[in-house]
Amino acid sequence: QVQLVESGGGLVQAGGSLRLSCAASGRTFSRYAMGWFRQAPGKDREFAASISLSGGTTTYADSLKGRFTISRDNAKNTVYLQMNSLKPEDTAVYYCAARTSPLVATLGQSYDYWGQGTQVTVSS
């Protein structure tokens, strides 16, 4: 079992930046590939980014490439999502997820554990 707690969300103006953190506790964090998803009001949850167990492989939603960066610190049991050049359409609840595999994945059903989410609001 892995417990995931997101933090770092908030209100930011368009063009600004935020860094989300996801702290993991429970079983060994370095056994899991990690992902970030988001869900905007009235929309389905969508994939944002994923990082492999080792951190050597990352993948992003096409719409986020170049603006978002996922990283992890296995010594701190934490995964991050650096979000730059934020747009109002990035407003959503952002969720951290873990999967019992070393490989990245873009489908939510591939993940086994989920955090409670953190709200990100980008004002125009």
Image (tube, helix red, strand yellow):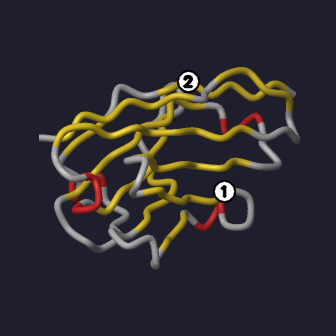
Pointer 1 residue? 68
User: What amino acid is at disc 1?
Assistant: Phe
| Res. 91 image quadrant | top right
Query: In the rendered structure, which disc, 2 or 1, sits on the residue that comes first in sequence?
Result: 1
* In the displayed structure image, the side of residue 98 where residue 58 appears, left or right: right
For mark 1, does the 10 Å Cα neighbourhood hold few (<14), some (14 to 19), or many (20 or more) residues?
Answer: many
Q: Is residue 43 above or below residue 65?
A: above
- The residue at the point 47 percent across, 56 percent down is 73
Pointer 2 residue? 119
- The residue at the point 76 percent across, 34 percent down is 88
**The N terminus - image quarter:** top left
**The C terminus - image quarter:** top right
Q: Position of residue 86 (x, y in %)?
A: 78, 43
* Label 2 secondary element: strand
| Res. 69 image quadrant | bottom right
Q: Position of residue 25 (x, y in %)?
A: 26, 37
User: What amino acid is at disc 2?
Assistant: Gln
* In the displayed structure image, the side of residue 20 where residue 111 appears, left or right: left
* In the displayed structure image, the side of residue 86 where residue 70 appears, left or right: left
